[in-house]
Image: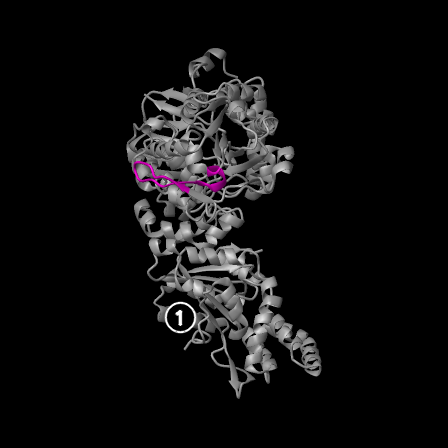
Amino acid sequence: MRPFKTLQKLYDEESQVVITEKGSPPRALFYGEGFLQEDLPVGTRVIFPRPPMAGVPNVKAAIRWAINHPDGMDPLHALLKPGMRLTCVIDDISVPLPPMVTPDVRQSILEVVLELAADSGVDDVHLVIANALHRRMTEAEMKRMVGEKIYDAYYPDRYYNHDAEDPDGIVALERTSHGEEVSVNRRVAESDLIVYVNVNFVPMNGGHKSMGTGVSNYASLRHHHNPKTIRESDSYMEPKASALYRSNERIGRNIDKHLKVFHIETTLNNRMFGAPTDFLAKREEDYTEGDRLKFQAMRYALSKLPRAAARKILNAVPAPYDVTGVFAGATEPAHAKTLETSWKQYVVPVEGQSDIVIFPIPFVSPYSVNSILNPLLVQVMGLGYFFNLNRGVPLVKKGGVLILLHPAYDEFDPEHHPSYIEFFHRLLPETRDSMKLEHKYEKEFAENPSYVHLYRKNNAYHGVHPFYMWYWGENGRQHVGKVIVAGAENNHVPALLGWDRTDTLTEAIEEARGFMGRSATISLLRIAPTVMVDVK
Amino acid sequence: MLAGVGEPSPVPASLTSPPLECQEARCHMPSKAAFFDVDGTLVKTNVVHVYAYYAMNRGSVLGIAGRTLSTALSVPLFGAMDTLDRKTFNEFFYRYYAGLTEDRLVTIAEDMFEDVLQPALFEQSQDLIDQARRSGCKVVLVTGALDFTMRPLARHLGADDLIANKMQFVGGKATGKVIPPIIEGANKANSIRAYCAKEGLTLDKCHGYSDSASDYAMLAVVGRPTAVNPDLRLRSIARAYNWPILDLK
C-alpha cells in the first residue's frame, strides 16, 4: 500500500487527467468482450471520464416541469386539442449504451405525455420509433423500452418502427436552400402535433438531427451522410465544427416550418456500470483490494468464456444511468440546454494534442446492441466516434498514430448486418476510398432488393448503412498518419481496413514511436464511460 | 429461342408503360434483372401440386379417378426422385400430362392459379418483386414448371418475362415430353445467361432468388444471388459465400 503522500503526488484529486509515473498502477482497459491490464510508458497522459453528475431527484416531476415550462413553445397541455392527431416519435435502441435499467427514461416521458393526451381528449395517438436506416427493434426490445402497459396498449398497430422504404409511407417537404431533399414519415407529417422523445447520450444526438434523420429516408440522408460532409466536419460532437450538424439544421428548420414539433430532450449522467462493476469507472489509483480482485476475476472469466457467451453476458447488464436534465420546447432552445448539460458531464479540458493516442474499444456500439461489434463497427468506434469525442480539435495530432485495442475478429451478424458482410469482403479489397465507394457502389447497395427486404421485414440495417459507417471514419482517416490495432487476432481484418497490427499494446506503442519519434507524446482516453476532450 | 420466352407475351399491360418516377429516375431501359425461382421461393407449392390439380380436373369421373389414383400412388416415387435429381424428376413427371389437350390445359391453368397458386403465395413475395422493380430490375420468373401453368402467376406478380419449360403438343394434345433444354439446374443458368445477352442486361448486376441448392448454378451465374427460404444445403452454401438469406413469410 503506497503512502497517501505518494498517491497525492501521482494525481490531483480533482483532475481527470493523470500523468503516468514510475509507480502508477496498470490500467484496466476494454478489449472487445474482454479486458487488458496494461502498464503504460512513463509520461503517458491518461484522461478519465468525469464522475457521474447527480440525477434529478424525481424524473417524472422533472418531465412534468419541463413540458409545463418549455422553451420557445406553449406548454404541452395547451397544444393538445380533443380529436387531434398526435404522434410521439421516439429515439431507438442505439442510445443509450448499454441500454439503461428499466424504466427507460423514454417510458417515463411517454407515461406522462400519454396520460396528459388522454386527459385532453386526444385518442388518435401513434408511437413511431425513429430508427431511420437502423435495424427495426424487436418486439422484446420495444416492450422493454416503453414498458408492458404502453406496449400492450399500442403495439403493433399504433407502436411501430419507422419504415424508410415504405413507398407510401414517406412525404417529401420542400427542399432546403442548399437543395437538400427533406423527407418525413407520412404519419408524422400528417400529424397535428409531434412530440419527440429524446435520450441524449452524446452531444451529437438530439436537436434538428432527431427529426431530420430519425424519420427520414435514404433520399434525404444522402445529402449529409456522405464523405464530403464528413470531411468538412472537424467534430460531430461540436455543432460549430460540424458540417453534418449544419446540414441537419437546414433540414430540421424546414421541418419545423411545416410541422409542429414539441421536443422533450433528456440528458443522462455517465453512470454506465452498476454496483458489481462500478470500479470500471474509477481511476486505478482509487481501486480497493476488492476492486482489484473483482477486476481480475472478471478478466479471467471473460477470457475463458466463448466470445458469444461473453457478449451475451455483457449485453445483458443494463446501465444504471440517472437522468440529469429534461428540457422541452422548440428544437433549438431546448437542445441548447441539452448540449450545456451534456458537455458539463462529458468534457474534460486537456492541454495540447498528442502524437500517439490510445483508444480501448469496448464490446458495444450504437449499431451492435444485442449483436456483434464487427470490423466495420470497430472502425467506426475508433475513427468515427472516439476520434470525434472532442470540441473541434482532435486529441491526436495531424499525422499522428491511433492505437485501438480490440481483437478485430472477422465476425458479422448476418441477421443485423447482412450488407456489411458484402461491403467488407467485396468492396474493401477493391478500394478504401470513400469517394470511390460512394460513387461506384452506394446506390447499388441502397437499392438492393434483398437488403431493402431484410431492412423492412426483418431486423437488418439498411443496405447503405455500411457505407455510412465507412464515411463516419472519414475525418479520422484523413487526419491520422497510421492506425495500429493492438491485440488483433488475425492479419486480414487490419489489412483490409488499412491498419497495422501488433500482438500487444507494448509492441503497438513501440511501432508508433518508431513512426512518430522516440519523444512522441502519448495519451490514453480511458473510455468507457463516455468522456470528451476539450483540447486547449 | 429461350423456352417460354417466345410464347405470346406474358407482359402485363401495366408494365408496358413504366411508372412516372421510373421514367424520371433512370428508366430508359433496365440494365439488370431479378430472376426468381418460383416453387418454394415465391409460392409454397411445387410442380406436384400443380399436376395434382390437373389430375383432379381430368374431365370425366373415370379420368379423375385414374389420374388421381396413379398420382397418389406415385407420390413416394416423386419425393425420392425430387430429392435425388430434379432433372430426372421433371422428365419423368411431365409424362403424366400425356393426352391432355392444349386448350384444356390453358383453361385449367387460370383456375389452378386461383385455387392452388394464389393461396400458396408467400405474403411478402409481392413486396420483394415490387422492390426489385423499384430498384430498376426487370422481373423474370425462372421455373422448371410448365409455361402455361405459370403464366397467370407471372401476370399476377407483374413479371416482365417467364422462362419455363414448354410441353410438346402433337395434334393439339400433350405428348408428355418437354421441349429441350429442360429448364432446371445448370440449364437455368444457361437460360439466364442467354436471356441477359439477348436483352442487353449486365449479368453481374442481376439478382437471383431461389430456395434450393439444386439452383446453385442459377444463383452462381448472377452477380447478386440471394437464398430465399433455403433448404439446409443452400443455407450452408449461402453462409459460406456470404449471400443474403431471406425468410419470406
Horizontal placement of A204 versus B249: left or right?
A: left
Q: Does residue A88 appear left or right of residue A424 in this picture?
A: right
Instruction: Determine if the magenta segment contains residue A451.
Output: no
Q: Give the quadrant of the C terminus of chain A.
A: top left
Viewed as shown, does residue A516 lie left or right of A20?
left
Residue B196, position as x, y percentages in the image: 38, 68
**Which residue is outermost to the top?**
A5
Up-down relation of residue B236 to residue B8 (above or below): above
Q: Which residues are magenta?
A: A172-190
- State the image coordinates of residue A246 (x, y, percent, origin top left): 34, 32
Q: Observer-nearest residue: A12 or A151? A: A151
Give the quadrant of residue A499: top left
Residue A175 visible in image: yes
Q: Amino acid at mark 1?
A: Tyr
The residue wearing badge 1 is B195
User: Viewer-proximal residue, A137 or B54?
Assistant: B54
Q: Provide residue B203's location: percent of width, then percent of height.
A: 38, 64
